[in-house]
Image: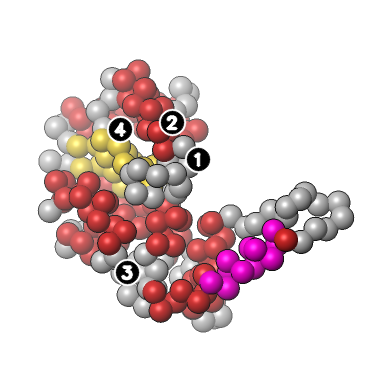
Amino acid sequence: MAIKIFVEGIADQKFLKDFVEYKYKTDINQEDIIATGGWTKFTSEGKDGEVIRNKMTQNSDNEGTNLLIFDADDDFNDRKGELEDWRNKWGLDFEIYLWPNNSGNGDLEVLLENIINRKNQPVFDCWNQYEKCLQSETIEGCEVPLTTPARKTKIYGYLEVLLGDSKNQKEKIKERNRDYKKADFWDLDSEYLNVLSDFLDSYFK
């Protein structure tokens, strides 16, 4: 039975590939984790959306299973409801899981921040102080409070601090090249991942 996982982007692809390989000793093919380009493209009634819907339908017709793993973003209940409505509208068959933990608001980066190797926590402690400092400052002509960097930038910064400064090491920071099985940086046995494991167990265990 083919399992197709539909995600938003490259970061999701790489994390899930590493996690499934680590947790279930299963080498999942990259083409079975499909990057949709995000919420807007997935729900498009144009060509982008049609391509994704066709892939889901074809897999279902072949008795395969479709999993949709997206960000909850600012409202878990709203996003889940929107996806369920979309599933019903087009008669699609897929199971839904929303980052970071299938119950709260957020995204993949929230999950990643919760599964770092705890010996590296000082990196985020410093970053959090940096954000607090920005929020307390005012600069003429700028929005108040100042805009803090996105969570993607925070994860990028976390790895940039820990890796070397050679071109080869810098490449490892990029989403497509990250190694989430590297225990010096990430804890794939973290209790924070138990909910994700519970969701995936019936498909990969």
- Determine which quarter of the picture holds residue 23: bottom left
- Residue 197, percent from left and from top: 22, 53
Q: Are marks 2 and 1 in contact (CB under 8 Å)?
A: yes
Q: Secondary structure at mark 3?
A: loop
> Up-down: is 122 above or below 78?
below
Segment tinted magenta in the rendering: 125-135
Could you classify mark 4 by the number of other residues whose Cα lies within 10 Å: few (under 14), some (14-19), or many (20 or more)?
some
Q: Nearer the viewer, mark 4 or mark 3?
A: 3
Mark 1 or mark 4: name the one nearer the start of the chain: 4
What kind of residue is marked 4? Lys
- Residue tagged 2: 78
Q: Secondary structure at mark 4?
A: helix
For image coordinates 39% across by 68% down, the residue present is 116
- Residue 94, percent from left and from top: 26, 32
Q: Alpha carbon of mark 1 to alpha carbon of mark 4: how far?
A: 28 Å
What kind of residue is marked 2? Asp
- Residue 106, percent from left and from top: 46, 47
- Residue tagged 1: 74
Q: Which mark is residue 55?
A: 4
Mark 3 or mark 2: name the one nearer the start of the chain: 2
Q: Alpha carbon of mark 2 to alpha carbon of mark 1: how far?
A: 9 Å
Q: Is residue 131 magenta?
A: yes
Q: Alpha carbon of mark 4 to alpha carbon of mark 2: how far?
A: 25 Å
